Image (cartoon, rainbow, N blue to C red):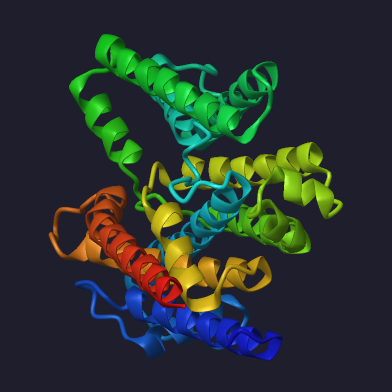
Amino acid sequence: MRSGRGTALVCALGAAVCALSVALVITVGQAGIGVADVWRVVVERLGGADAGLSPIREGIVWELRLPRALLAAVCGAGLGLCGAVLQSLLRNPLADPFVLGVSSGASTGAVSVVVLGVGGGALSLSAGAFVGAALSFALVLLLAHTSGGTTDRVLLSGIAAMQLFSALTSLIVFLSADAEQTRGVLFWLLGSLGSASWVEVAVGAGALALALAVCLARAHALDAFAFGPEAAAALGVRVRRMRLALLLVTALLTAVLVSSAGAIGFVGLVLPHAARALTGPAHRRLLPVTALLGALFLVWVDTAARTLLAPRELPVGVATSLLGVPAFVLILHRGRRGRSAHGTAGAGL
């Protein structure tokens, strides 16, 4: 599986499993829709024969469940990709897409639009979230640059921005939101794919494709960063320029995803570790496999979140955290056992 052909085969198989999973999760629910119905609706919408379904059932497939499942796949893939890049770029196994303060900034932007009416109606919730995320990342870059621009300074700047914008969000909700606004905002802040639209799917998929292409083109630089900035510079990598470019790509992708789905945690933290166990550290293999695992994970977790407690819906960010914490603990223990085994073997030589 570590060869190029093996990686291509795994990616092709993973893409097929993702497509099948999307088709299957659309059938899960009370409407009694089968995979064949999903296929007929898709064919009809692409210009084929009439699906033969009632307008309500056709709307459930095309307007509700299919864009939601596709947005879940896009968000899972994107968050996993960003996590894999940041963990190598910052040389920190606990780095995830929200370490740069992007999520908290998006939350502040969204709350400002909903509660304070910032933009006078010209900004949607998603647009406000994107603006907030961009402002937060700009602050992180400014703080990191003025304090030296090293990896640890980027992390510390991200933590500072995260705390600042989280406090601003809480302050806005506390001072200005009524009970109904508070419930709606909190549900979005905990992650929700319930308002998925085809526009959000298209924007998210485009951002994901661009980010994946950029990161794959710089896979060798990411491999070099894993050994530290000095080693990367010795291998011909322009460290500051490359770090800034990759941070910008991951921040913009995270901003797009968070503006559509809210804060969904643990996907970018856990999935890169799971993919690394399958593929090894080489990023040309790691990045696409992480994206596929993230897509599969979030598609099924979101399906569980919307159906297990029906008619109530569990915020998908809560579901990913409930599953992500035990999975991360398992990964930590497996890594510890692996290091212990290597240490024992080395001592015996």
Q: Nearer the viewer, residue 212 or 127?
A: 212
**231 on left or right of 334:** right
Q: Residue furthest right?
A: 236
Percent x, y for residue 89? 63, 48
Name the image quarter holding the N terminus: bottom right
**Horizontally, is 142 left or right of 343 in the view?**
right
Q: Is residue 67 visible?
A: no
Name above or below for residue 148 compared with residue 256. Answer: above
Who's the residue at 46% across and 85% down the image? 39
* Foreground of the two, 251 or 282: 282
Quadrant in the picture for residue 154 = top right
Q: Tell me what residue is drawn at x 21 percent, y 52 percent.
A: 314
Q: Residue 226: horizontal and vertical position, in percent?
A: 63, 55
The residue lying at 59 percent from left, 69 percent from top is 286
Q: Position of residue 176 (x, y in %)?
A: 30, 11
Residue 211 visible here? yes
Which of 176 and 79 lies nearest the eye of the viewer? 79
Q: Position of residue 118 (x, y in %)?
A: 49, 16
Report which quarter residue 22 is drawn in.
Answer: bottom left
Report the side of 15 relative to 339 (left or right): right
Instruction: Decide: is 195 above or below 174.
Output: below
Residue 62, picture quadrant: bottom left
Q: Is residue 54 above or below residue 150?
A: below
